[in-house]
Image (cartoon, coloured by chain):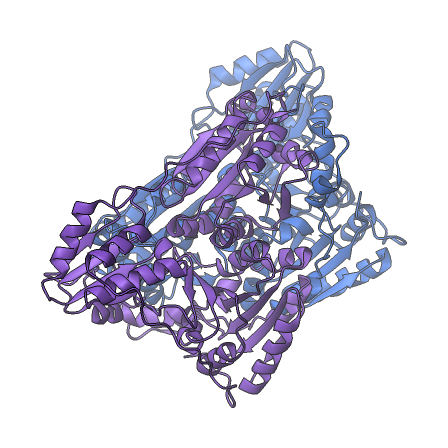
Chain colours: A blue, B purple
Amino acid sequence: MNGAQALIRTLVSCGVDVCFTNPGTSEMHFVAALDDVPEMRGILGLFEGVVTGAADGYARVAGKPAATLLHLGPGLANGWANLHNARRAHTPIVNIVGDHALPHKQLDAPLESDIEAVARAVSGWVRTSTGSESVAADAADAVTASREGRGQVATLILPADVSWSEARGPAEPTAPAAAGAPLPHRIEAVAAALRDGQPAGFLVGGRVVSDEAGLVAAARAAAGSGAKLLCETFPARLARGAGLPPIDRLGYLAEFAEMQLAGLRHLVVVDTKEPVSFFAYPGKASVLVPDGCQVHHIDEGGVDPVAALVALADALGAPAEVERQAAVRPDAPTGELTAQTMSEALGHLLPEGAIVSDEGNTAGLFVAGATAGCPRHDWLTLTGGSIGQGMPVATGAAVAAGDRKVINLQADGSALYTIQALWTQAREGLDVTTILLNNQSYAILNMELQRVGATDPGPAALSMLDLTNPTTDFCAVAQGLGVPAERATDAEGFTAALERALAIPGPALVEAMLPPTL
Amino acid sequence: MNGAQALIRTLVSCGVDVCFTNPGTSEMHFVAALDDVPEMRGILGLFEGVVTGAADGYARVAGKPAATLLHLGPGLANGWANLHNARRAHTPIVNIVGDHALPHKQLDAPLESDIEAVARAVSGWVRTSTGSESVAADAADAVTASREGRGQVATLILPADVSWSEARGPAEPTAPAAAGAPLPHRIEAVAAALRDGQPAGFLVGGRVVSDEAGLVAAARAAAGSGAKLLCETFPARLARGAGLPPIDRLGYLAEFAEMQLAGLRHLVVVDTKEPVSFFAYPGKASVLVPDGCQVHHIDEGGVDPVAALVALADALGAPAEVERQAAVRPDAPTGELTAQTMSEALGHLLPEGAIVSDEGNTAGLFVAGATAGCPRHDWLTLTGGSIGQGMPVATGAAVAAGDRKVINLQADGSALYTIQALWTQAREGLDVTTILLNNQSYAILNMELQRVGATDPGPAALSMLDLTNPTTDFCAVAQGLGVPAERATDAEGFTAALERALAIPGPALVEAMLPPTL
C-alpha cells in the first residue's frame, strides 16, 4: 500500500468519501489509488474554483467534509476564492494539494511556489506531509482539524514521493473537541441584562439558523426578552419556509442594517460576529452596533450555541412555542419579466425540500419575500463576498442532496467566474436547476459606484460595469457544456420554462432576461 | 485630484497606458478616474485569470508592462495562476489590488484576507499604499520594480480610502538599474574553457531568444565553439521563422532532454536556469545537467545577456554570419484531422508577423516542425506550467500587436480554465484566431499516469482524465461569448476553416476535432 492509498483509505474511515478533483502530474498516484478504494467517489471539476466551491456546498448540505484534490500552488490559488467563502461559512473542507516530490522542491522547477503561504491565508490548519509513514495520520488529523470549533478549511500538502512511497497503512479516525455546555453564570448575566426593559435584539447565525432546533431556540430567547430577532447577512445555510420560525436577515446595505439595529441597547450575538459594514464608504461608519448598545455573547469558548440559546430562553421564562411562518405562495406572475416577477414565479413553484444556492446578488433582492411561505427549504448564501460561488456550491450541494432538488439563483456576472460547473453537473447527472439572471451588467457595481461618491461616472467607467457588447448567450454556453437550456423573456414564459426545468431529473438552465437596470 | 487619479496619471507618465480590469466596490474610485485620465485604456475581463494572463501577453509583445486592477484577496487569488506563469516568464506586470479602507481592515469584514501573503508568493515586489499623499510615488516605484532585472510582477495594494482621499498629484517616473556590461575576465574564462575541444552546448532563453539580435549572438557563440545550441523548454517569447537562426527547444520530457544534453562536458547557460525536469518521477534524476558537465554563466549579476553572448562570440573568433532558417511551408494536408495534419495546415497558412500563443500541450507537439520555415513570427509559451494561460495571453498580445495576427493554439482542457477570454476578444474586436484542439481528454495526464508508474489505471482513475461525457461543444461556448466559430473534422475542412478564420479581422475560433488519443 502506497501513501496515496493509505491516505484515501484513512479519509474514508474518517467519513470523507467524496473527493472533488482537478489533478495534475504530481497527483497521479492519488488518482490511480481511487480504483483501489472504491468507497471514495471522485468527481472531476474542470476548474479548481468549481472543485473548492463544490466541496463547500457538499459540506453545507451533508454536514460533513468532502476532500478536494488540487494541483500545486496554481491549483490551490485557482480554488482560493471559493475557499475564502468556505472559510467565512465555517465549512469543514479537507484540501489535498499535491506538490513536487520533496527532493525536487529545492530545484525551483517551473511549478514550484510557496504553497503553504497561499494555503495559510485561507485555511485554519495547514500541514505538509513529510513521509509516507506519517501521511495517513496526517489525513486523520486534517479531517479532525476541519471539524474543530465552528468548522474550517484544513489543507494537507502532499508531495508526490509521499504518495508513491510504501506506507504503513491507514490511520484511525480521531475526534474533534466536543462543544461545551452553556456557562450558567454567563447565561444568567445576559438574562439579567435583558430584563432591564430597554430595546434589545438578537443577531444569530451559523448553526443556529441551519435547522429548526436552532431557529426555535433563537425565536424563544428573543420572544422571552421582547427582543428583535435578526439573522446574519450571509448565513452558510438558512432553514426557512412554512412551519419554521421566520427570521429577517441583516441588510447588506449598511444604511438598511443601521435602520434594523437603530435604538437597540442590547445586542446578543450568537454563532456569528458583531455586525460591520461589508465595505467602507467615505464619511460613513463601518461599525454597525449603535452607540450605547451593549453587545452580549453566550457561546464564547466553544460553547454549543443552540444549547446556550435554549438555556437563555429558559432563564428568561420564554414559552415553549413560537410564531411559525404561515404557508403561502405567490400567484403565477404575468407581464414583464423583472426581478420581482422572476421571484414570484420561483415562489409559485419552489419544491418542498429544495436547496437554494443563492448568488442572485442584486437580481435576487425580491426572492426572500416571495419564497418565505413556501414549503420548507434551505438557503445557501455567498458567505465571503467572493463571486463565482453559486454554481459550484449548487454542484456540491446536489451531490449531498439525495432526492432533494437544488436550485441555483445565479447572477450573470458571477456566473462567468465558474461557469465550468455546468459540465460537472452534466457528467454527474446532478439535479440542479439554474436560474440564470441575465441583467447584462455588474449591477451591484453601478449601485456601489454611486454609494462610494462617484456620482457622475463617464463612459470609460460605465463600460467596466457593463456586460453587453457582447451580451452573453448563456443558453449557448450551457448547451456547449452539456446542460439543456432555454431563454425566457416574459413572466409567463419564465414560469413555464422554470416548471419544465424543474421537471427534469438532472441539470437544466433557464436564462431569465431581466431589464438591464433594477 | 484624488489618490486614484494621481495613481493612474503616474502610471501613464511611466509608460503604462493599458489596464486590464475586473473591479469591485473597493476599486470604484479607480474605475471612475478612468474618465479623468483618457490616456489609460481600461479593458474589462470577466475573470481575473483573464486579466492577469492578458497583462502577461501584452508585456511579452509590447515590451513594457500593463497594469491590472483586481478586487481584494479573492481577485488576486483568481489571477494568481497566470501571475505565476508571468513570474516564470519574467514579465513586467504592475498589479493594482484594491483593498478595504485602512480603518476598515481591523474589522475583519467578510472580504478581509491577508493579501500581502498571497501577493508575495507570486510577486518580486509588494507594497501596501498607506496614504493618498504617497500613492503616486508608490505607483512610480511599482512600475520601476516591474522592470528591474529580468522583469517581474510588482503588486501595489491600494486601500479604498487611499483612492478616494485628496492627493498631491502625479509622481515623476523613476528608472530601473540598467543592465551591466559583460565582465571581460568572465568572458575570457568561459572562452578558454570552451577551447578544450570537449563537447559543449549553449542553453539560452529569456531576452536572448526574443529577437534576431539575441538569436544571432547565441548562434555565433555556439558556432564559434562548435557547440550545440538549445533554447529553454518554455521561453516567454521565441522569435522564429525563415531568415532567423533556428534553435531547438529543450524537451519537456526529461528522457528527451537527457538525450539532447547527453555527453556534454560544458554547458553555457544564458538568461535562463540550469535545466531540471518539470516534475520528479520515481527512480529518475531531476537534475538534467549530465554528470561531469561543467556549467558556465556569463550574465550573472545583471549583465546584459545578449551583450555577453556577443562578447563571447567575438572572444571565440566566431564568424559574423550564421546559418539561417530556409523558407519552406508544408503543403495543405488531406485526409484525417490529426495533431500532424492540423500542424501542417497551420504551417501552410501562418501569416507573416503572426504571434502564436501556444497552449497546445500534447496536441501541439508537431507544430514546431511544421512552422519552422514559415515567415517570421513570435511564439509565446506556457512558461510556468499553470494551465489556462493561452487564451488570456492571446488576448493581451492582440492588444499590443497592432496589425499583427494573433493565433492561439489552445488545448481543450486548458481552454476551460479561462474561456471567458473570448468575451474580451469580442468586446475589444481583437484579431485573435483560436485553434481549439479538442481531443476530449487531459491527454498529457494519460501520458503522465504511465510515466509516474501507475501502469494499470482503472476506470475511476481514467475518468479523472477524460473530457467526454459530455464532450464540450466549443463552438457553442464561443458563440455564446460572442466569437464566431466553426468545427472541422477532417484535414481539408480544417484548412479551409482556418483560412476563413484568418481572413476575419477580429476574433474567430476553429474547433479541430482530433482523435481522442495521440
Q: Residue at coordinates 42% horizontally, 63% vertically from top-left?
A: B239
Left or right, B217 with respect to B328, comes to left
Q: Is residue A199 above or below residue B221?
A: above
Visible residue check, residue A509: no
Q: Residue at coordinates 58% horizontally, 27% vertically from top-left?
A: B170
Which of the pair A13/B489 is nearer the observer? B489
Q: Position of residue B180 (x, y in %)?
A: 30, 41
Q: Position of residue A418 (x, y in %)?
A: 57, 54
Which of the pair A351/A251 is nearer the observer? A251
Q: Position of residue B391 (x, y in %)?
A: 54, 60
Can you say which quadrant of the picture contains the N terminus of chain A?
Answer: bottom left
Quarter residue A115 falls in: top left
Which of the pair A190/B27 is nearer the observer? B27
Quarter residue B12 falls in: top right
Q: Position of residue A423 (x, y in %)?
A: 57, 64
Q: Residue at coordinates 35% horizontally, 68% vertically from top-left?
A: B245
Visible residue check, residue A2: yes
